[in-house]
Image (cartoon, coloured by chain):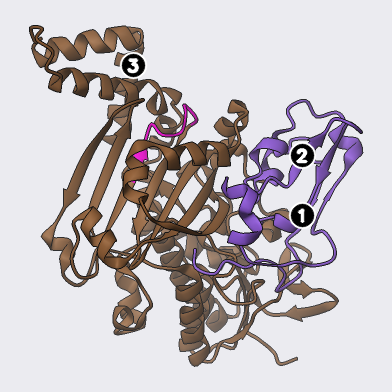
Chain colours: A brown, B purple
Amino acid sequence: MKAYDTIVVGAGPAGTTAALIMAQKGLKVLLLERGDVPGAKNMFGGMLPNSPVLDEFLPGFWEQAPWERHVVKRILTITGDTSATSIVFESQNFDHQPYNGYTLFRPHFDKWYAEKARQFGVTLITGCLVEDLLIKGKTVTGIRVGKDEVKAPMVVLCDGALSLLARKAGFCEQPKPSEMALGVKALFFLKEEEINERFNLVRRQGVTQEFLGCTEGIRGGGFIYTQTETLSVGLVFHLDSLKQSGIAPYDVFQRFLASDPLQKTLRGARLMEYSAHVLPEGGYGAVQRLFSDGVLLAGDAAGLCYTNGLNQEGMNLAITSGLFAGETVVDALETGDFSARVLAQYGNRLKESFVLKDMKTFEKTVDLMHNDRLFSVYPKLIGTIMEQIYRSDGKPRKKFGRLGWDAVKEALPLKQAILDLIKGGKSLA
Amino acid sequence: MIVDDIFDLVSYHIHEEAHIKVNHDICQSCIHRACTFMCPARCYQWNPENSRIDFAYEACLECGTCLLVCDKGALDWNYPKGGFGVRFRLT
């Protein structure tokens, strides 16, 4: 077998970016993907937030990449038992290039992207499961596939949220259920015109809708993303909270799909596909080892994924970390030093960029997201208050402040509400 | 229900050998049996007749939930061999 400078495990957005960058710089790169096409194993909400670096290393990226709609509208819907309160944000600034976010299909996008990497000279092998890392002393020296061993000075691990390889090699602990979430998703076909009409969109405009309070008290939320003529609809659950609930995710999902707001959106839509995967949800505090002698971790494998309640980011962090990983390997190869000391540059670059800066900024938000009341008491409370504000029943109205105060007092101990408010304020403000 | 129609909705290339192996002896000491309700593909079911977990790997979505919630370490958890297992078409 020919000699490679680097082996990249996983042809998702992180791995393919790393491989492509290194090939552009003249390295011999082997990119291994366990799916029979890149993207066959990847599950995603989803929206790819604008990632300016893509246009830098692949000029004209967005003109060529297979995306579905550009997102101009973001909706947050808070559901009560019999009500839904929505905040709709729509911006004309998101309606011209560079667009702010794109919906896409991963089996299409990842396949196209890996093909781009191949055009730069990356050797892509699909249907290839890397079973182990080769380790000599404390240094990673290659990979094992079945009985075959391939050695290389550097290995870049982009093998997804579970990162079995890093765990097997002892670089990382198995993620705790409290740091991970389960996403379940159904894809529905709906005519393009119907989608445009239901969400008030034109051309290739798209929308994302997040739901809070729809998970039966389990910490998590719901989502709808619009593709050209499909809707991605799903729920995300914190694993520890789902475990505690004793409820099956597909049962909650079925009831979510049958709920009033979803029924209206999905009227006449045809179910096409079902998927599920875990995702990192532990934020900055759960990011484990990013590098070790002879190896770098990028994307979900490194735990680079977060939400602050309004932003859900992962794929852009994967792409950017893949870029830094690739560039770090190029530098390491020039010096011939692949030790953790040199690879620390990778960690520093992540820390200096939006990737770890954003995760750090919202570090405390993870605690807020682990407050059960945010998913049960508070969404209901908002429904109660809004309904009282709008209800006309021949009885005298209260001032809004009084009404809110009374509703809060009825819903939970006041001390608790104040503590939550302070904690929530601190984590976001 | 969606999970009842999983083989109509999801495409698979099923390997003849299970990629996850369940150690039934270890399962006996489990009190929560979280895998039986948390697996989004309903691969794990408690069989009261012989008091053990029935595991069917064929519908596995390779999501990782069972691995993360099994606190007894009863699972020898691997991905299917290259090119096998779930094959998402669009999602």
The part of the chain drawn in magenta is A210-218
Residue A304, horizontal then vertical, whole percent: 48, 54
What residue is disc 2 on? Answer: B45
User: Residue sitting at 69 percent across and 55 percent down?
Assistant: B60
The residue furthest front is A268
The residues tagged by marks 1 and 3 sit, at their Cα atoms, a distance apart of 46 Å
Observer-side mark, 3 or 2, equals 2
Which amino acid type is shown beneath numbered disc 1? Tyr
Which amino acid type is shown beneath numbered disc 2? Gln
Q: Is residue B39 magenta?
A: no
Q: Is residue A150 above or below residue A287?
A: below
Q: Which mark is residue B57?
A: 1
What residue is disc 3 on? Answer: A419
Circle 3 chain: A
User: Residue sitting at 30 percent across and 7 percent down?
Assistant: A410
The residues tagged by marks 2 and 1 sit, at their Cα atoms, a distance apart of 11 Å
Q: Position of A71 compared to A285: left or right? A: left
